[in-house]
Image (spheres, helix red, strand yellow):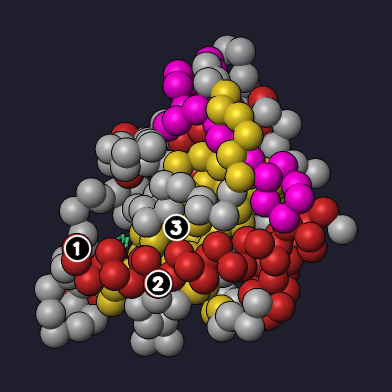
Amino acid sequence: MQLAIIGGSGLTRLKNLEVTDHKVMRTPYGEPSAPMTYGQLGGHTVIFLPRHGPGHTIAPHRVNYQANLWALRECGVSHVVAVAAVGAISSELVPGALALPDQIIDYTYGRAHTYFGTPQAPVTHVDFTHPYCTALRQLLADAAAQAHLAIADHGTYGATQGPRFETAAEIRRMEQDGATMVGMTGMPEASLARELGLCYATLAVVANPAAGKAEEVISLRDIEYHLERGMEKVRALLARLIPLITA
Ligand code: HPA
C-alpha cells in the first residue's frame, strides 16, 4: 500500500508532513504539476502532489491530469486521496464542511480525459458505475469519526470547466441533475485514476455556497477563510487515516 494525497486549492502544502525527498517525474504525457513530495506522516511514507502546482499557478482546465496520475502510479502509489474545494449546491453542506462524494457528473470539455484510444493503448472501456473507491471512502469516514469530525458521507460531485464560477441557472440545472456540490478538478482525475487501477477517493471541502445559493456574490476572500478552516480538519483527518490504511 502506498498512499498519495493530491492537494487542491487551499492545500498546496501539508503542514504536518515531514518532508524527506522530492522527485521530479517525466511521463509520456508530459510533466506533472510539481515534483512528487515524499514525507512522513504518522510514521509512514506518503507522497504529496499539489494539483495546481507549488505556487497555485495551474488553472483547473490546464492541470495535466494524465501526467499527475501516471507519475503517481510510476512511484508505486496504490491509493489516492484527492482533496478538492467545492461549492455547496445542497443546503446540507455549509462552508467549512467536509464531504465524501459517492457519484460524479462530468460537465467538463476539451480535457485530455483518457489513456486509451491510441495505437499503443487500444480502446478499453472501464467500469465507472461507482466512480470512487468504496474501501477508501469507508476508511476516510472512519478516520473522520475517530477525529470527531462531521463529514457528509455521500454526495454527487458536478465537475465544471472553470476557471470562472457558474451562473445561477447552471447551478439550478446541476441541482436538477442531482449534483449536490460543484468543483472544477474532479474530472478527468477520477476516471484517469480508474483507468490506471488506482483506488481513488475525493475528500471535498466546502468553500462557498454555489452561485445563486446565497445573497452575496462569491468572494475569494470568503473562500480562503473557509478553506483555511476546512484544511485544518483535512490535516487532522489525514493523520488518523494513515494508521487505518496501513493496518
Ligand atoms: N464552483 C466550482 N468550483 C468551485 C466552487 C464553485 O462554486 N467553489 C470551489 N470550487
- The span from disc 2 to disc 1 (Cα, nearest Å) is 14 Å
In the rendering, at what x and y percent does residue 149 appear? 58, 80
Mark carried by residue 229: 2
In the rendering, at what x and y percent does residue 217 appear? 12, 73
Q: Determine the quadrant in which ligand 1 lies.
A: bottom left
Q: How many numbered circles does the render carry?
A: 3
Among the 4 quarters of the image, the one containing residue 193: top right
Front-lying residue, 35 or 60: 35
Query: Taking 45 as reference, is 171 above or below it?
Result: below
Q: Which residue lies at the image location 38% right of the left edge and 36% below the top edge?
A: 53
Asked if labels 1 and 2 touch by Cβ distance under 8 angstroms, the answer is no
Specify whether 167 is left or right of 9: left
Disc 1, SS:
helix
Mark 2 or 3: in front is 2
Tell me the magenta residue range.
27-45
**222 in magenta:** no
Task: Name the residue that disc number 3 marks.
Answer: 84
Task: Name the residue that disc number 1 marks.
Answer: 220
User: As shown in the figure, which amino acid type bears the numbered disc 3?
Assistant: Ala
User: As shown in the figure, which amino acid type bears the numbered disc 1?
Assistant: Leu
In the picture, which quadrant includes the C terminus? bottom right
Q: Which residue lies at the image location 56% right of the left edge and 35% below the top edge?
A: 37
Asked if labels 3 and 2 touch by Cβ distance under 8 angstroms, the answer is no
Q: Is mark 3 within 8 Å of ligand 1?
A: yes
Mark 3 or 1: in front is 1
Q: Is residue 192 visible?
A: no
Q: Is mark 1 within 8 Å of ligand 1?
A: no
- The span from disc 2 to disc 3 (Cα, nearest Å) is 14 Å
In the rendering, at what x and y percent does residue 28 appear? 53, 15
Query: Taking 193 as reference, is 219 above or below it?
Result: below
* Label 2 neighbour load within 10 Å: few <14, some 14-19, many 20+: some
In the picture, which quadrant includes the N terminus? top right
